[in-house]
Amino acid sequence: MVESDSEYPLGRRIAVFGKGGKTTLSKALARRFHLEFIEQDSIKHQANWVELSPEEHWCAAETRFEQAPNGWVSDGNYSALRDLVLARIDTVVVLALPWRVMLWRTFKRTVIRLVTREELWNGNRENFRGSFLSRDSIIYDLFRRRRRFMSFGEQAEAETPAHIKLVVVRTSRELDDLYREHGLIRE
């Protein structure tokens, strides 16, 4: 159950799901509440884009959770980790933004990373071919699974256990309100 501590209004173990800002939000929550930030992509995608198996990812994520006894914020949409995450969290924040907003934010972020050659994790960087011309492209994946993401909020409401606090963010305005309400800063 979520601690009713005013210092941790969302508890000490928070998961952020969705598209179009989950990592930025997760980092802001972690900074604001002095919690460990656990980016699931950085665990899943090792150097040279080598992916851990679902079992290896589970074990590595579980270890990271255990190494953060004061709390953490985890971001990622990995269904293979769903039970692991749900068994540990106080709050889940779901970005269920309109699909066109998710697509625009993802596209814009990808172009910026391509231009700046920003390292994502473990030495990995996005490239044009992988970002736009591959079946592994995040843009293609978002388009392919658009129906799933369009019903993300309803799915979260139906599947999140009652003892977990659920925050569903459906609009950019609601996301801005969440930042304001908790004194979060986008970086």
Image (cartoon, rainbow, N blue to C red):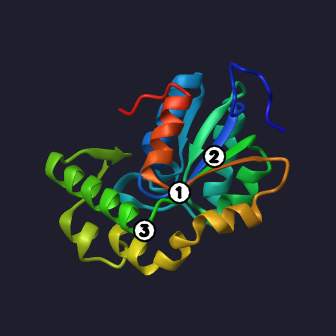
| Residue marked by disc 2 | 15
Q: Secondary structure at mark 3?
A: helix
| Badge 1 or badge 3: first in the primary sequence | 3
Q: Secondary structure at mark 1?
A: loop
Q: CA distance from mark 2 to mark 1?
A: 17 Å
Looking at this view, is 60 or 75 the one in front? 75
Query: Measuring 71% from the left and 43% from the top, which residue is drawn there?
Result: 91
Three-letter code, disc 1: Arg
Q: Where 147 sits versus 112, above or below?
A: below
> For mark 3, does the 10 Å Cα neighbourhood hold few (<14), some (14 to 19), or many (20 or more) residues?
some
Query: Measuring 34% from the left and 59% from the top, which residue is drawn there?
Result: 106
Residue 93 in percent (x, y) is at 61, 48
- Which quadrant of the rendered structure holds the N terminus? top right
Looking at this view, is 21 or 112 the one in front? 21
**Residue sitting farthest toward the top:** 7
Three-letter code, disc 3: Trp
Residue 81 in percent (x, y) is at 67, 58
Q: Residue 170 — which label?
A: 1
- In the visual, does 62 lie left or right of 75? right
Total of numbered circles in the picture?
A: 3
Residue 66 position by quadrant: top right
Q: CA distance from mark 2 to mark 3?
A: 21 Å
- In the visual, does 101 lie left or right of 126? right
Q: Point out the frontmost of discs 1 and 3.
A: 1
- Which quadrant of the rendered structure holds the C terminus? top left
- In the visual, does 163 lie left or right of 85? right
Q: Secondary structure at mark 2?
A: strand
| Residue marked by disc 3 | 99
> For mark 1, does the 10 Å Cα neighbourhood hold few (<14), some (14 to 19), or many (20 or more) residues?
some
Three-letter code, disc 2: Ala
Label 1–label 3 contact, CB within 8 A: no
| Badge 2 or badge 1: first in the primary sequence | 2
